[in-house]
Image: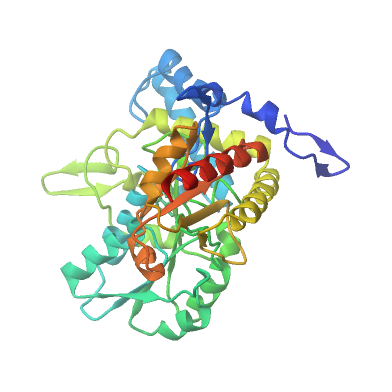
């Protein structure tokens, strides 16, 4: 699949790539599907669908528990997926990769197991104004229960983090900084490495919400200098209900388990229990085995295609969409950062985004409308909701044109 010519990989053959995604061949309301809701969840390639199917057909068994052949095969596949996630993030060790239900659970794990045991009243947690609710509410819960304080790092009107102001907020009271790598609501790619370097000077750990980053760019947690990194498989062509938390081994070692049950122990008696080693200490109960295997397949698939090639293709789509959408009367793009992922959120004068989304859907085009689980950033921009198109490796320039035709028809109908 990988084509290398004199060291440079060729551009994506998007038409061929699309054949690997069965759902893209379907029609919606009698029109060819144009799927532009990839930030909500991407579609799955055959490699992922078949990996999950293959597990259930051929070697379905519980992991780490049986001596029988099926369990051995399932355990091997499960652990190979952990290795794949380790490679994806360039983590030092597979001991640092904890399977979770997704980004949300990964962040809750850090809130409950890393911060809760040590945080005191008056301590501070910093997050940016553009966070998804999953990087706000777990900290608010913790603050309510402990008297700690959640503080907001400001952004500008383009939707960029104000790094100097953020640095000025870091003090000896700061116990953690949470930052989204790529904003789902604006598309902003945050200067994570710079923020981590600043935080490090103050000895403050940084958790990165990578849900929207891993499908679009090469992530290297060691180069970023962060301490925790959260991801969801379903944003990167893998299944729902599975994701991962990466954490620095020394931090994870020192953290207590956050859920108790099978798998996370070495010995249990009524006199006391000893916990399993990393990463199993944080994986109580039977895990989402098929999901993890699907996630491993998604990582391998991304490696085969090449995230850099995907990013180059998506950048062209983003440029084309931004240019054409800027010409639409009454349309305002919300989120105009200099460095953006393939997301364009917008409002249209006098039109509710939900009405727009419904009409556009009748042209076969799937977009997302609403607050995108990022209400504080909507409040910052003074809007209740936006419409959002978000691109993936299989999207075509021509699909953006179909969307724009549908948008124009909707605009004429609604204004
Ligand atoms: N954003 C969107 O349409 P989960 O649900 O745990 O897989 O991911 C949550 C999450 C966390 N952070 C960011 C930046 C996200 O974009 C998301 C999911 C979807 O934008 C659903 S609201």
In the image, is residue 176 above or below residue 89? below
Which residue occupies the extreme top position in the image? 57
Residue 135 place in picture, x, y as percent: 36, 60
Residue 39 falls left or right of residue 340: left
Q: Quadrant of the N terminus?
A: top right
> Can residue 128 be seen here?
no
Which residue occupies the extreme left position in the image? 270
In the image, is residue 142 above or below residue 83? below
Figure quadrant of residue 11: top right
Residue 25 place in picture, x, y as percent: 56, 22
In the image, is residue 339 above or below residue 299? below
Figure quadrant of residue 267: top left
Q: Nearer the viewer, residue 84 or 102?
A: 102
Name the residue located 27 percent from the left edge and 61 percent from the top edge.
137
Name the residue located 12 percent from the left edge and 49 percent from the top edge.
271
In the image, is residue 355 above or below residue 227? above
Q: Nearer the viewer, residue 4 or 278?
A: 4
Name the residue located 66 percent from the left edge and 53 percent from the top edge.
319
Which residue occupies the extreme right position in the image? 6
> Can residue 232 be seen here?
yes
Q: Nearer the viewer, residue 384 or 53?
A: 384
Residue 167 place in picture, x, y as percent: 47, 82
Q: How is the image coloured?
A: rainbow
Residue 346 place in picture, x, y as percent: 48, 56
Task: Please tell me how many numbered marks the rendered image carries.
Answer: 0
Figure quadrant of residue 398: top right
């Amino acid at each position: 699949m990988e084509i290398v010519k004199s060291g440079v990989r060729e551009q994506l053959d998007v038409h061929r790539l699309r054949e690997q995604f069965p759902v893209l061949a379907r029609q919606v309301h009698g029109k060819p599907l144009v799927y532009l809701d990839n930030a909500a969840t991407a579609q799955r390639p055959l490699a992922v669908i078949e990996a999950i199917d293959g597990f259930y057909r051929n070697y379905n068994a519980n992991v780490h528990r049986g001596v029988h052949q099926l369990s051995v095969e399932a355990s091997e596949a499960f652990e190979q997926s952990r290795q794949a996630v380790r490679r994806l993030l360039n983590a030092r060790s597979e001991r640092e990769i904890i399977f979770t239900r997704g980004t949300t659970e990964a962040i809750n794990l850090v809130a409950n197991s890393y911060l809760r045991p040590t945080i005191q009243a008056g301590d501070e947690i910093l997050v940016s104004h553009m966070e998804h609710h999953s990087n706000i509410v777990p900290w608010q819960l913790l603050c309510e229960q402990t008297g700690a304080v959640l503080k907001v790092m400001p952004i500008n009107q383009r939707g960029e983090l104000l790094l100097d102001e953020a640095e000025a907020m870091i003090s000896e009271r700061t116990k953690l900084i949470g930052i989204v790598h790529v904003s789902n609501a604006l598309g902003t790619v945050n200067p994570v490495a710079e923020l981590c370097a600043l935080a490090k000077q103050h000895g403050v750990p940084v958790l990165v919400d990578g849900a929207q980053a891993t499908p679009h760019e090469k992530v290297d947690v060691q180069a970023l200098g962060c301490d925790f990194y959260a991801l969801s498989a379903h944003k990167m062509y893998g299944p729902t209900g599975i994701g991962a938390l990466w954490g620095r081994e020394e931090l994870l070692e020192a953290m207590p388990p956050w859920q108790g049950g099978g798998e996370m122990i070495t010995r249990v008696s009524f006199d006391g229990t000893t916990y399993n080693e990393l990463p199993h200490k944080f994986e109580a109960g039977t895990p989402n085995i098929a999901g993890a295997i699907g996630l491993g397949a998604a990582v391998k698939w991304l490696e085969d295609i090449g995230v850099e090639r995907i990013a180059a293709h998506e950048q062209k789509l983003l440029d084309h969409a931004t240019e054409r959408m800027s010409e639409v009367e009454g349309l305002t793009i919300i989120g105009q950062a200099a460095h953006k992922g393939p997301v364009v959120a917008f409002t249209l004068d006098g039109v509710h985004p939900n009405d727009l989304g419904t009409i556009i859907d009748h042209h076969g085009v799937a977009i997302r409308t609403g607050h995108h689980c990022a209400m504080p950033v909507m409040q910052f921009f003074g809007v209740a909701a936006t419409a959002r198109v978000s691109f993936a490796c299989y999207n075509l320039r021509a699909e953006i044109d179909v969307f724009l035709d549908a948008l124009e028809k909707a605009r004429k109908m609604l204004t």
